[in-house]
């Protein structure tokens, strides 16, 4: 009998970059793997730890305020080459908000300081300063993974370079910058987004797309994911989407 498939999920800076329950993304992936008989293990990758891309199947990073981003940015530079190589090699990634910003070329923070990013996505982010309005609220996005719903809270405005694909189009909320209708970014199986929530528990199609990409990279293109009973995930999605529609209507 063949062995059970096994996935290792790297979680970058789980103790520093974990705003608004972003840790729930790891929980959702592990749960959806185990429900299908796939063994899943979360590997914390902290400051000073090496990214061993051949041992990892999926990479997560959550959000953090400017202060936390300052703490991790120099260390992330050290990991940049391995992470870019992993993305080029098809590894699925989910980078949220403060983590997403550092996956672009640079983040100019609220004081005007430049934090270098690792350039996974062709984009840059600028914070217009402490007096500018923040982009806060519920977000609905139309994406190749269907409708995504989440919560955003960021001061930085992200601008994609021409040719950089967004994750999707904003239906409600601000998204990357509140101006051009884009939300997030996508390169290969790497996804960046402003959506917290946590995102994956109430967007199971996106969770499964990441898991399937990880499985195929490790075990070959014939790997499939049997469907799960998504009743509660769908209810959570619908409830959050209804709130997003209602709040945006009143704004
Ligand atoms: N510090 C960033 C900003 O405000 C990111 C915040 C976050 O991760 N929610 O733009």
Image (cartoon, rainbow, N blue to C red):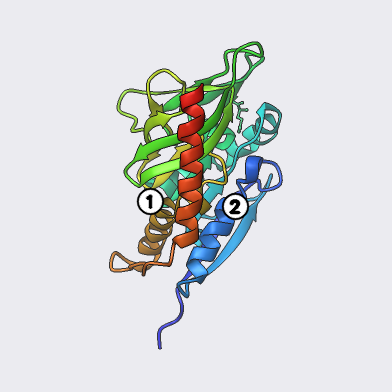
Residue 206 lies, in percent from the top left, at: 41, 51
Residue 13 lies, in percent from the top left, at: 65, 45
Q: Do the residues labelled 2 and 1 touch (CB within 8 Å)?
A: no
Above or below: residue 120 compared with residue 52: above
Ligand 1 found in image quarter: top right
Location of mark 1 (residue): 89
Number of other residues with Cα within 10 Å of mark 1, as a class: few under 14, some 14 to 19, many 20 or more: some
Closer-to-camera residue (170/245): 245
Residue at horizontal 57 percent and vertical 37 percent from the top: 99
The residue furthest bottom is 1
Residue 180 lies, in percent from the top left, at: 38, 20
Residue at horizontal 54 percent and vertical 67 percent from the top: 40
Badge 1 marks a residue whose secondary structure is loop
Nearer the N terminus, badge 2 or badge 1?
2
Location of mark 2 (residue): 24
Above or below: residue 202 compared with residue 226: above
Number of marks: 2
Residue 67 lies, in percent from the top left, at: 71, 28
Badge 2 marks a residue whose secondary structure is helix
Q: Does 26 sit left or right of 229 as displayed?
A: right
Q: Does 12 sit left or right of 186 as displayed?
A: right
Number of other residues with Cα within 10 Å of mark 2, as a class: few under 14, some 14 to 19, many 20 or more: some
Closer-to-camera residue (104/39): 39
């Amino acid at each position: 009998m063949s062995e059970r498939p096994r996935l290792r999920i790297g979680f970058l800076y789980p103790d520093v970059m974990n705003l608004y329950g972003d840790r729930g993304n790891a929980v959702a992936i592990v749960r959806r793997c185990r429900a299908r008989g796939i063994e899943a293990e979360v590997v914390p990758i902290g400051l000073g730890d090496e990214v061993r891309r051949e041992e990892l199947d999926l990479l997560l990073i959550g959000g953090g305020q400017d202060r936390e981003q300052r703490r991790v940015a120099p260390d992330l530079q050290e990991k940049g080459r391995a992470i870019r190589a992993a993305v080029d090699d098809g590894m699925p990634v989910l980078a949220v908000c403060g983590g997403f910003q550092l996956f672009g070329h640079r983040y100019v923070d609220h004081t005007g300081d430049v934090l270098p990013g690792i350039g996974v996505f062709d984009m840059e982010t600028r914070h217009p300063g402490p007096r500018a309005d923040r982009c806060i609220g519920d977000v609905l996005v139309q994406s190749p993974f269907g409708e995504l719903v989440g919560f955003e809270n960021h001061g930085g405005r992200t601008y994609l370079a021409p040719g950089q694909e967004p994750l999707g189009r904003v239906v409600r909320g601000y998204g990357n910058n509140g101006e051009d209708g884009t939300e997030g970014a996508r390169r290969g199986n790497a996804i960046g987004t402003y959506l917290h929530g946590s995102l994956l528990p109430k967007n199971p199609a996106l969770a499964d797309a990441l898991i399937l990409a990880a499985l195929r990279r490790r075990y070959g293109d014939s790997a499939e994911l049997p469907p799960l009973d998504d009743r509660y995930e769908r209810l959570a999605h619908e409830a959050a989407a209804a709130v997003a529609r209602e709040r945006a209507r009143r704004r």
